[in-house]
Image (spheres, helix red, strand yellow):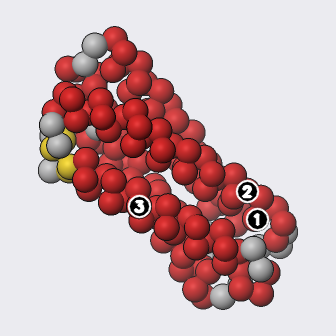
Amino acid sequence: MTTIDDLHSQNHEILELSRVLNYLISDRLICDTCTAKDVFFAYMDSARKHLEQEDREIYAPLLTKGDKNCRQVADRFMSGSREIKRMIDHHMKRWTRPGRQELRIADHDGFISETQELTRLMEDRIVDEAEKLYPMIRKLTGNEIRAH
């Protein structure tokens, strides 16, 4: 069973990885290190798992127990989740070797730009989750979230 505190903890980890990743990739020589690669894959994995967990566990209470406003919020967050996962898939396809945890960066500036765009979008979502989604869930279910 997931709690709001678990989700906040995941968000903290994602934000930390985001900051470290953006710092590491800014220098081309550091971008090519194993450390930068490990942080990149840890970030992508954490962000995706977080979104997938929310898809499985968060939205059902809002859609079934909530009022019209709750359903609209759930719809917006589900739509945003689909878009971010699509961007993660595109990013992984463009900048990694399929089936391997290996980066392939021919255009460093493009890689930085796209990575920063993705991390900024995820950071904005995390703020929205903390300010809008989690308080609404907490009102409906308390701190624990039961998947339906």
Q: Mark 1 points at which residue?
A: 111
Residue at 54% x, 76% y is 39
In what element is the residue under mark 3? helix
The amino acid type found where label 3 is placed reads His
Left or right, residue 58 beside residue 19? left
Task: Give the residue displayed 26% in from the left and 41% down from the top.
Answer: 57
Picture quarter containing residue 148?
Answer: top left
Determine which quarter of the picture holds residue 59. top left
Image mark for residue 114: 2
Residue 129: % across, % down: 41, 40
So how many labels did they put on this image? 3
Res 12 label: 3
Between tags 3 and 2, which lies in front?
A: 3
Q: Where is residue 77 in the image (x, y as percent from the top left)?
A: 45, 33
Q: Which amino acid does label 1 sit on?
A: Phe
As helix, strand or loop, the secondary structure at mark 2 comes to: helix
